[in-house]
Amino acid sequence: MHESQFDPKILDKIHQLEEKFKASGQDMLSYLEGLLYADYLTYWEYINLDVLLSLQQPKTSFKDEKIFIIYHQITELYFKLIISEMEQISDSDPITEEFFKQRMERILMYFDHLISSFAMMWKGMEREQFLKFRMSLLPSSGFQSAQYREIELMAADAFHLVTLSKRSEFDYHSPADDIFEHLYWQQGAIELASGQKTLTLKNFEIKYGKKLIEIIENYRRKNLWQKYIDLDKPSEEMTELMKQFDLKANVFWPLAHYKSAVRYLQKDPVDIAATGGTNWQKYLPPRFQKVIFFPELWSEKEQDEWGKGWVVKEIFGED
């Protein structure tokens, strides 16, 4: 068949492919031959469906444990989506407000799904089953979600994440190692009796400590706050997106988690063991930690009352 008899669109794509492979020193004909022999892609292969559905491996015979596993796996996938958007923002240089806003809107959408999805936990599991199978999972804890720690450290100047009692002792230039040792969530995994780090925290630090310290350093100049102040006169809409992210990540999300913990765990300190030793009563409520990614965007009164109104309304049912 003469070349002129081919569809011009097909010829154009062939020429583009030829240039692409020539630029990388590859033989286009070899790749076309490989395409000829390759099988058609299927949905289940593309998303690794069989592997995905095999990743739920309960440790007990309680049926509701599968809900617990699947929910946390879904959560980690949403975290991965959020991190992907944050990486795009941080790596965009220079960044435009329009690009920033589009990615922030996606992040807020993912957080909305995360916050509402906690109903899968407190509506979807029998409390009696949870309290039994949870004890077989010690010392693991949702506290050990490294991806969520990455989100925090990619969002804010890391010294804002230092435990409240020592926050004033740190600033933008503080060494990453020192900041890491005093991050607020470290205080949520201290044994009540001894004051020492729990096994939950020790294992977490062994697995992820080095990586998280590197993130503190690597995102010192390109976290979301730094990218925001790089904008030339951010609009009110952009500022509102930043504030909504702060609220969803640091008030609504931990509050949803707290509501679930209140439903399933006893309030007696003895039962803190069911969370791997983490002191969730003091760790989860936003008003205790007062973690605020962007304090510069909030008034002094708003910071003083951080999370208080939402906790009173959601937990105690008061307006």
Image: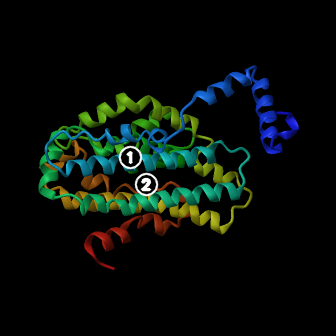
Residue beneath the point at 16% across and 41% down = 193
Residue kind at label 2, given as amino acid type: Val
Residues 138 and 1: in front is 1
Q: From mark 1 to mark 2, how far is it between C-alphas?
A: 8 Å
Residue kind at label 1, given as amino acid type: Tyr
Residue placed under numbered mark 2 in the picture: 291
Mark identifier at residue 306: none
Residues 59 and 282: in front is 59
Image location of residue 154, percent across then percent down:
53, 44
Image location of residue 27, percent across then percent down:
73, 21
Mark identifier at residue 184: 1
Residue beneath the point at 79% across and 24% down = 22
| Mark 2 surroundings: few (<14), some (14-19) or many (≥20) residues within 10 A | many
Asked if the residue under mark 2 is in contact with the one under mark 1, i.e. CB atoms within 8 Å, the reply is yes
Badge 2 marks a residue whose secondary structure is loop
Residues 174 and 307: in front is 307
Q: Is 58 situated left or right of 236 in this image?
A: left
Residue beneath the point at 55% across and 35% down = 217
Residue beneath the point at 57% across and 47% down = 86
Question: Is residue 156 in view from this perspective?
Answer: no
Structure colour scheme? rainbow
Q: Quadrant of residue 17?
A: top right
Q: Quadrant of residue 122?
A: bottom left
**The N terminus, quarter of image:** top right
Q: Is residue 258 above or below residue 274?
A: below
Badge 1 marks a residue whose secondary structure is helix
Residues 263 and 35: in front is 35
